[in-house]
Amino acid sequence: MTDRKTLLIVTAHPDDETFGCGGALAHYASNGVKVYCACCTRGEAGVYEPENMKGHATVGDMRWYEMECAARTLSLAGIFHLGYRDSGMSGSEDNKNPHALINAPLEQVEGSIVKIIRDLRPQVIITSDPIGGYGHPDHIAVHKATVKAFDAAGDSRQYPEAGSPFAPQKLYYNVFPRRILKLTVTLMPLFGQDPRHLGKNKDIDLASVANVEFPTHASVKLSRNDRDIRDKATDCYASQLDNRPRRRSLLDFLQRLSKEDVDLFMRAYPPVAGKLREEDLFEGTDPLSGTSE
Ligand SMILES: [Zn+2]
């Protein structure tokens, strides 16, 4: 038993942790929290340029290598691949792959997350929001499985083969500031981009995403150092940046414009009634709790 604070983020693809809330992960890791990332796939369906392969045999190998670089930069305590394959965006050929995350039974994905939770014993868990950030089917799948796993991990009757029960105390969804999203949607046409048809398959509708509001219950303030580390970790994902330099630069510009130096989260558990603005995801947690059964 340990009184060490532990944080687990459950994601779909290499880069979700860094692009989503890399600043907050850097913040906690540099403050002595053990921060782990469980990633369902190795991003096999990601778009990339041939020069990004740099001798890697497969796209999955290349993207996992990038993730190892980001994990070192963020000082994560460990990263885990849960063994599924990237499903790609809705309607792509990758959807049909039998190993794709979206084709795995929900209970199977839930069970593999329960095992990770019981092994690592985190007080706090972070995952995707219910619409998967921008509607990626894998992000939605990982959201559903993590919500169920969060509930199941402390119940000895569920997944008895996955280790001793352990109940994590808080569950958060990483949410992107709506204010910036709305501003992006407004400004995109000026940069020659259509916010309703983004991405390789032109099937990301940022305008709709910007209109789905999520309450913000926690904002983790990022120091200059946290942001520098996040930006260095972002650079590890060269294969995912090369293909969308204009989008990235627009987003960078807007982030600078809005002086956003926080990562935002919606708290799913314990449930929140009314308004709440925590500054620390570990607020109110008991380092020794969750081990009773
Ligand atoms: Zn992703």
Image (cartoon, grey):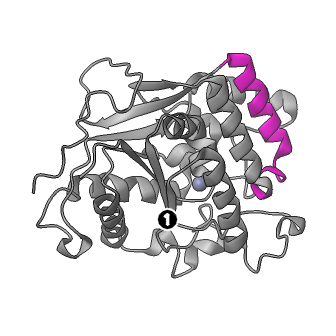
Please state the horizontal and vertical placement of residue 53, each as a whole percent of the image.
82, 70
Nearer to us in this view, 160 or 179? 160
Residue at 36%, 59% in the rendered image: 145
Give the quarter of the image for residue 268: top left
Q: Does residue 259 appear left or right of residue 171 in this picture? A: right
Q: Please, is residue 52 above or below residue 178 in the view?
A: below
Magenta stretch encompasses residue 30: no
Can I make out residue 43 in this image? Answer: yes
Magenta stretch encompasses residue 256: yes
Q: Main secondary structure of the magenta part?
A: helix
Q: Please, is residue 266 above or below residue 82 in the view?
A: above
Nearer to us in this view, 276 or 73? 73
Seen from this angle, which residue lies furthest right? 51
Quadrant in which the C terminus appears: bottom left
Q: Secondary structure at mark 1?
A: strand
Please state the horizontal and vertical placement of residue 113, each as a whole percent of the image.
36, 63
Residue at 56%, 39% in the rendered image: 21
Q: Amino acid at mark 1?
A: Phe
Give the quarter of the image for residue 278: top left
Magenta segment boundaries in residue numbering: 239-259
Residue at 66%, 29% in the rendered image: 225
Please state the horizontal and vertical placement of residue 283, each as a whole percent of the image.
32, 27
Please state the horizontal and vertical placement of residue 237, each as a whole percent of the image.
74, 53
Q: Which residue is mark 1?
A: 80
Q: Quadrant of ligand 1?
A: bottom right
Give the quarter of the image for residue 116: bottom left
Q: Does residue 215 appear left or right of residue 48 in this picture? A: left
Can I make out residue 186 in this image? Answer: no
Q: Answer yes or no: disc 1 within 8 Å of ligand 1.
A: no
Dot 1 surroundings within 10 Å: few (below 14), some, or many (20 or more)?
some
